[in-house]
Image (cartoon, coloured by chain):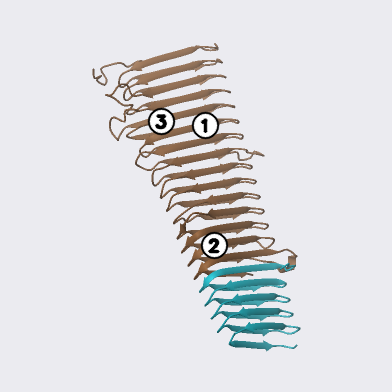
Amino acid sequence: MKIKPLVLAISTVLCTPVGMADNTVTADAAGNYNTITASQEGGDGNSISITQSNDNNQSSTKQSGNTNAVSVSQSAEGYSYGNGSGVANISQVGDSNSVGVHQDNHNSYGSDHYISVAIIDQQGISNSTGVFQGYQLGTNWLTIAQTGYSNGAGINQFYGNGDSADISQWGNLNSASINQTALNSANSASISQDNTGGLWGYNTALITQDIGSGNTASITQYGSSNKASISQEGSNSRATINQQGNYNSASISQTASNAQAGILQVGDSNSVTIQQTDNTSPQITQSGSGNTITINDNIWNNQNIQIINQTGDNNTANVDQSAATNSYVNVNQGGSENNSATVSQSGDTNSATINQNTNSDSGHTDIANIIQSGYSNTITITQQ
Amino acid sequence: MTSNAANVISITQTGSGNNKAHVTQKGSMGDVIVQQTGHNNTLVQSQSGATNRSLVAQSGNNNISLQGQNGQHNTAIALQDGQNNQVIHHQEGDGNNRTVIEVGNGKKVVITETGKP
């Protein structure tokens, strides 16, 4: 039986036990255009569980206290309806809280205008969030904000069109991961971690985008001792990492053609690792000292353009292009002491350029090393 | 080659040839080491400063090595093994500038030196 909107089932659950613990709210609704609101404030060990099936359902939950939990499931039922435009809005204040969201149009039924939305806000320490959004003909849309330390967020968006996921974390010892598998259109993922003013960040960010084409991923980290990693398997992908602070590491792996990678690091003792294949053009800029860059293009690289800029002293750049054709490497090291650049190219019609500023009166050594094997290759090295 | 130089440039081009290398080094106590194999290779090198060293080894035919040095106590060495190769050394400056050339089956060597020995 088809359920008509606005006629049926507006189910509202409002539960507000103040200052009590171990309370449980359980709400189930089957139908369209249902709205569930649940609030638990001031207690510990509380839980809210919401299950909504069919289309255009919404839920809104609030919890304050510690060791609280929210679970929201919005999914299709039978073979007639999908979770067309489900919305889950969750807010938690306190420590050791958890959120689980499952939005699933497993029938892949409905319109490509459908949008599953999850908005999650957590404030406190040792909080966690896990979200699955899948099998959506339309778009999955997610945003998570976590303020505090030792928080974690894990996202899986599976088979949507033009999905987007954004995670913002403020504090240290946080971790965030996004996994996206595209159905047709390109997905986008973004992670921001900010520990400005803190001594050590120890934040980690991981984005994985399987298959698809034209996916975009970006990670921004402020603070020290952070790690950022992006892995993209689809063609025409774009990855961007921006890190400001010391002892940070950035890693990008792109295994399909026509990928673009950009990395900016400002600070000392940072490192970059990039692995790519055909028609790629990473642009890397490091500003500071004691930084390292490692690029490995190890599988049939054609028309790769790699531009590396390092300013500061004691920096190292290593580029390896194997089986490359018509590829170009440009390494610019703007410091004047103890910089080192090594470029290795095997293949034909490749070119490599190294520019180093030097200060021979300082007693330090700058090293430029280029190794090419093949035909009609070109090398240009300038030390001055 | 062990180097105690302030700056070091090392180039290796191997394969059938037609490779080009262009090197510019400014400052003192620098080393440039170039190895090219194959045919129709070209090296153009410029060093300005004192006590610099340049070592070029080319094996193959129709290779060209142009080594220019401007300063004092510089050293240029070119080794070529093949046919129709060409070495051009141009040194400007005073002191003990030295040039050592070995050409096997080569055809043309041009050396110009200005300055006091």
Identify the residue at image location x=67%, y=80%. B70
Q: Position of residue B44 (x, y in %)?
A: 58, 77
Left or right, A359 with reference to A165? right
Q: Earlier in the sequence, mark 1 or mark 2?
A: 1
Task: Specify the label residue A133 is tagged with.
Answer: 3
Dot 3 or dot 2, earlier in sequence: 3
Same-chain check, marks 3 and 1 = yes
Residue that carries the numbered disc 2 in the rendered image: A345
Q: Are marks 1 and 2 in contact (CB under 8 Å)?
A: no
Give chain B's shade: cyan
Image quadrant in which the C terminus of chain A is located = bottom right
Chain ID, brown in image = A
Residue B116, horizontal then vertical, whole percent? 74, 88
The residue under label 1 is A153
* In front: label 1 or label 2: 2
Question: Is A29 in front, or is A222?
Answer: A29
- What chain does mark 2 sit on? A
Q: Is residue A272 left or right of residue B3?
A: left
Q: Vertical placement of A359 versus A68: above or below?
A: below
* Residue at image location 62% in from the left, 77% down from the top: B46
Q: Is residue A203 above or below residue A63?
A: below
Label 1 resides on the chain identified as A
Is A148 on the left or on the right of A235, as rendered?
right
Three-letter amino acid code at the position of disc 2: Gln
Q: Secondary structure at mark 2?
A: strand
* Quarter residue A59 falls in: top left
Q: Using the numbered discs, state the Cα–Cα distance from disc 1 to disc 2 in whole angstroms.
A: 41 Å
Q: Residues within 10 Å of mark 3 (few under 14, many from 20)?
A: many
